[in-house]
């Protein structure tokens, strides 16, 4: 499957923001083996889901999600309440944490809006494959709570720079 222009812009913005790594991620994800265990990713994501701010913002997503590992890239399936943190994203603490935050934002942000319509085209040039405005807003919020205000400001700035606004 090819990456759309808008999807690639979302990835570029995330990496360009140069997000820091939290103390919790350094503690959980610093390891002696080649890859961070997906079980440690689950502990990290579940700790976010148990946080007061998360429960206030995303009460309907408080039940722990399933976190699996596997080859390749990370992916989230909100309908199945399942996140895969791929081996490509489990090479170090920073990359692993950022993948966890990114995929958690997909879990809490449905692709269908309040009126039941899709937030964006499902395919084609106008699709960001789930990296739509609502996802970006939630990703910035999750980043702010997990990594701090400065990280969220940098992420928002990079989304704007790459043509993906987070304000209406």
Image (tube, helix red, strand yellow):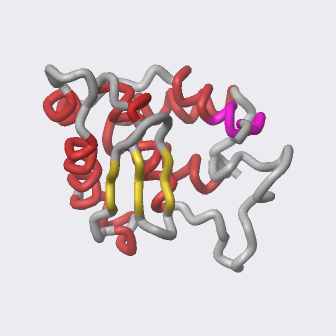
**Residue 30 vertical placement versus 138 (above, below):** above
Q: Is residue 50 magenta?
A: no
Taking the spot 33% from the left edge, 35% from the top edge, the residue there is 97
Residue 138: percent from the left, percent from the top?
50, 52
Q: Is residue 163 left or right of residue 94?
A: right
Q: Quadrant of the N terminus?
A: top right
Residue 162: x and y in percent read: 70, 28
Task: Name the residue rendered at 47%, 41% in the picture.
Answer: 74
- Which picture quadrant has residue 119? bottom right
As drawn, the residue found furthest toward the front would be: 71
Most common secondary structure along the magenta stretch: helix
Q: Nearer the viewer, residue 37 or 164?
A: 37
Q: Which residues are magenta?
A: 3-10
In the image, 165: left or right of 90? right
Give x and y (percent) for residue 102: 46, 43
Count of residue discs: 0
Residue drawn at (63%, 45%), measured in percent from left and top?
166
The extreme right residue here reads: 125
Residue 69 locus on image (x, y percent)? 34, 44
Q: Nearer the viewer, residue 168 or 42?
A: 42
């Amino acid at each position: 499957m090819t990456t759309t222009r808008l999807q690639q812009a979302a990835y570029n913005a995330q990496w360009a923001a140069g997000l820091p790594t939290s103390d919790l991620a350094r503690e959980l994800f610093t390891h002696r083996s080649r890859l961070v265990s997906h079980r440690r990713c689950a502990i990290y994501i579940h700790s976010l889901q148990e946080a007061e701010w998360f429960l206030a913002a995303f009460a309907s997503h408080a039940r722990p999600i399933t976190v699996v590992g596997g080859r390749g890239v990370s992916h989230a399936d909100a309908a199945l309440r399942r996140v895969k943190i791929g081996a490509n994203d489990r090479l170090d603490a920073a990359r692993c944490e950022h993948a966890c935050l990114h995929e958690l934002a997909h879990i809490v942000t449905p692709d269908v809006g309040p009126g039941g319509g899709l937030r964006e085209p499902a395919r084609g040039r106008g699709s960001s494959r789930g990296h739509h405005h609502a996802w970006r807003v939630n990703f910035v919020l999750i980043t702010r709570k997990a990594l701090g205000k400065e990280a969220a400001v940098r992420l928002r700035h990079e989304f704007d720079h790459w043509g993906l606004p987070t304000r209406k």
